[in-house]
Image (spheres, coloured by chain):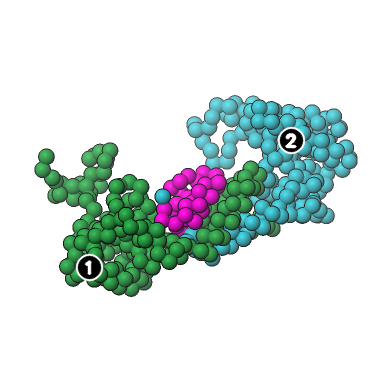
Chain colours: A green, B cyan
């Protein structure tokens, strides 16, 4: 295909990135070789190090190169609040957007028996153990508002109730800046049903 | 930002890829760590090898890990035809789309004095030398139909004429599957002026 076998191999390897097809991979490879070899060298190094050293936190399961992540080890975070998210990306989104100062638990997925994601895969035994410790007073369920996310939320609520811990769920409704006209029916019905006093 | 410094560094490094912003870089990093560590490992290796070993062909300037690329070294390509393109991507596009069996010369840019791209940067001395060898009978100019590409084409034509070599240019006109209604005026005027006998 190309006049350089190494280049063809690089283009093929770039396709492991999500959303990158043949054309984009070509463009990326040529761009790096022509204009940004230092960036490419740095990317290669950091990728190798990240894959080698990043594992999961033993306490909250998020990505971490330490046995227990900095956030779990922190003495300044409120240990009575535990927010459950599906992925480390969701955790990052909450950290960046809100002033939440509690701790997290990352499911690394959502309940989906067909994909082999059950309570064990989501680390719910670890979560039950954490709740049994007695430090947590509120479990904030921040799974996505999808069918699987809702099923997961339901199971998490049961888990919390069994441990005598209060469970809460992120509010659903009209997003800021959204226009009623363009919002899907489910969201609108939810927002209407959950209307609050002015 | 994230609970893992190595992860933050990886996300930052991914932004050297063209068209990849902060959100996409996050998504790529999480995807690789969560679902495709083997792919990430392979990408890191191939990237490192490519940056280290891929240079430019001494004859046509395309990317190659050999001193002279396979295409230039090939005995089965017609040495009387030389196609000049701006980038290795353009070369690949012509290889994939056409049945062209001649050789190439890659400018690695286009004439653009403001960006410091002059005749020297485009390797025109190397091209003049190649034409002077006497093997080439036709110089096929396949620069892009932009202002800079046209200026480059003009200069290439002068170079060819000076060496007594015939120069030709890719045909401009209505693209296949295009509708006249939606084609820009310049292209339409070109296609009209260059109409051919039926």
Residue at point 34%, 50% (across, down): A95
Q: Is residue A182 above or below residue A87?
A: above
Residue B11: x, y in percent?
49, 51
For the residue pair A195 and A157, the one nearer the viewer reads as A157
Residue at point 50%, 46% (across, down): B20
For the residue pair B158 and B76, the one nearer the viewer reads as B158
Labelled disc at residue B129: none
For the residue pair B188 and A62, the one nearer the viewer reads as A62
Q: Which residues are magenta?
A: B2-31
Magenta-span inclusion, residue B11 = yes
* Secondary structure of residue under mark 1: loop
| Disc 1 + disc 2, Cβ < 8 Å | no
User: Residue A175's image quarter?
Assistant: top left
* Secondary structure of residue under mark 2: loop
Residue with the mark numbered 1:
A134
Q: Is residue B194 above or below residue A29?
A: above
Residue with the mark numbered 2:
B121
Chain containing mark 1: A
Chain containing mark 2: B
């Amino acid at each position: 295909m190309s006049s350089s076998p190494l280049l063809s191999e690089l283009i093929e390897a770039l396709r492991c990135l999500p959303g990158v097809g043949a054309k984009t991979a070509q463009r990326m490879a040529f761009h790096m070789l022509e204009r940004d070899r230092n960036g490419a060298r740095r990317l290669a190094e950091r990728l190798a190090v990240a894959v080698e050293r990043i594992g999961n936190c033993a306490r909250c399961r998020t990505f971490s190169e330490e046995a227990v992540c900095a956030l779990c080890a922190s003495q300044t975070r409120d240990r009575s609040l535990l927010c459950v998210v599906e992925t480390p990306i969701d955790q990052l989104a909450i950290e960046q957007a809100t002033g939440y100062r509690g701790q997290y638990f990352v499911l690394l997925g959502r309940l989906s028996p067909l994909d082999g994601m059950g309570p064990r895969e989501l680390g719910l035994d670890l979560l039950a153990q954490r709740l049994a410790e007695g430090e947590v007073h509120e479990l904030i369920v921040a799974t996505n508002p999808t069918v699987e996310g809702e099923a997961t939320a339901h199971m998490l609520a049961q888990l919390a109730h069994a441990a005598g811990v209060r469970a809460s769920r992120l509010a659903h409704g009209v997003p800021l800046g959204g226009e009623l006209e363009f919002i899907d029916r489910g969201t609108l019905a939810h927002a209407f049903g959950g209307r609050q006093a002015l």
